Image (cartoon, grey):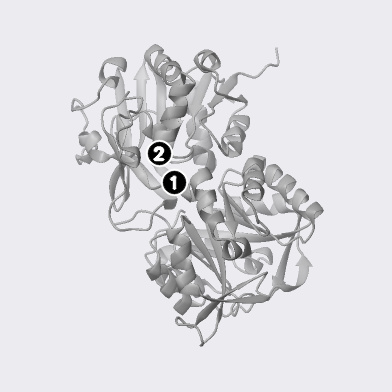
Amino acid sequence: MSGLAVRIIPCLDFKDGRVVKGVKFENLVDSGDPLERARIYEEQGADELTFLDISATVEGRKTMAKEVARIRRGIAIPITVGGGIATIDDAARLLDSGADRVSVNSAAVRSPAIIGDIASQFGVQCAVVAIDAARNDAMPSGYEVKIAAGAVPTGLDAIAWAREAAIRGAGEILLTSIDRDGTSLGYECTLLGLVARAVGIPVVASGGASKLEHFLEGYQSGASALLAAGIFHRGEVSISEIKKYLSAHSVEVRL
Amino acid sequence: MSERPKLVIVETGVANLASVRALAERLGMEPLVSANPEEVVRAQAVILPGVGAFGPAMQKLKDYHLDAALRARVAEGLPTAGICLGMQLFFETSEESEGVDGLGVFQGKVRRLEGGLPLPQLGWNRIEPDAGARLLQPGWVYFANSYGVSADSFPELLHEDGGAGREPARRGAAGGLFEHIAAAITTYGGPFVSAIEAWRDDRPSLLLCQFHPELSGVFGTQLFARWLELNGARRPL
């Protein structure tokens, strides 16, 4: 018996302090001031916010930390920050700035010890492992982990990697389907189900949600939280609409 | 005369205190992060935040004589709050760090949450205060915990009438310190104690939250605003 509500999480992609959203990680479009957006989402009932920093420069990352600090003061819901975190110092800087949790992706694949380091230093709830997975029939589960924003295949099986991340101390998996990201086709539910069943920690579904029923499918596949970006930024679906829809289907949400 | 009342956030180690600081700012208090026991005793209000594990946090409190400072505040009825692990530390022991004594203000043990659900519990869940609660209200709050105070530490919570009129069975040192104690319960796999308000001199001087009021939106901010106002540590807005 769980009274826990499924979380709806808008994801804001940052480049040099501005919010952008790409389609399949390319063709980035600037769509607004981050604090303004964060406040709108909090008012709409967002349960948490995730920021992904896609800046490629040191300057961009510094701007990100400043933005996190500014947004932290302006909103009272949890913030997860990811993107480019390579060391425990990177994680510490973002946590000091006001992130409640950090997500590691490529760095965790390259040196998995960072997962345990973050968990032991800041608590398991701080350590989110982001996994970008793509269909690959050569893998035992049919899904392969890719890093560097989806550009580099790793040869790692997505389910095996999720399990290892959990064992190493991850408190949550942020699971993005590269095949679905930006397509509006809905979450990759097969992948979601496999990962959710393989680990005993919460799994956040990401990539492809565009319609109300996609969010229900994600929940039914075992996700503890449902993330989306473009549809929120473009105002196509509101968080409150999603929550009402889920509630009407007997899913526990915070209304 | 523009000096804001100080809210001391107890430093218990490597901590990410930005959210608790932001809460203090929203409440019109000046946040001061400190491991100095004198500052902790003197502060208008104190928050013991939740960071790390039970054993290391308790060790840090002892090393800096913060355990005595916190017990003194509780004994004198000075406004003191514990968040997440900061709530758990007010109990006797925890499964997370066997053999380590907590502050022991309340009798009982902190246990790993049971029920086979994903851990940590991450996200929004409801608190249901018992019938005797005057500060706590039912509502959605944000949790990030794998451990919690077992509901059998507050058996009256498990009664359908919220234990109204029933004398609490087990209170430890707190039984003699407070005139009135009420608690809230939350269900995740099974029931656990998600908050406690303890009154002395008609003030809810001690407030313990397993959830994160600083991350619980307007609900969390308003809970702490009412807590400070009832303690005379902050004027109503």
**Helix or strand or loop: what does disc 2 sit on?**
loop
Kindly identify which chain the residue marked by label 1 belongs to. Answer: B
> Pointer 1: residues within 10 angstroms few (<14), some, or many (20+)?
many
Q: Residue at x 48, y 58 (%)?
A: A172
Q: Same chain, marks 1 and 2?
A: yes
Circles 1, 2 touching at the beta carbon (< 8 Å): yes
Residue B126 image offset from top left, x and y in percent: 38, 47
Task: Residue B127: give its label.
Answer: none
What is the x, y in percent for residue B128? 33, 41
Find disc 1 in the rendering and name its residue.
Answer: B143
Between B155 and B132, the residue placed more toward the observer is B155
Q: Earlier in the sequence, mark 1 or mark 2?
A: 1
Callout 1: SS:
strand
Q: Residue furthest bottom?
A: A137
Would you say residue B29 is visible in this rendering?
Answer: no
Disc 2 chain ID? B
Task: Tell me where residue A148 sits by quadrant.
Answer: bottom right
User: Residue at the location (56% across, 35% down)?
Assistant: B20
**Residue visible at 49% across and 40% down in the picture:** B219
Left or right of residue B73: residue B166: left
Image mark for residue B210: 2
Residue B215 image point, x, y percent: 53, 43
Percent across and percent down for residue B17 are 58, 36
User: What residue type is disc 2 on?
Assistant: Gln
Q: Amino acid at mark 1?
A: Phe
Residue B191 seen in render: yes
**3D distance between C-alphas at marks 1 and 2:** 7 Å
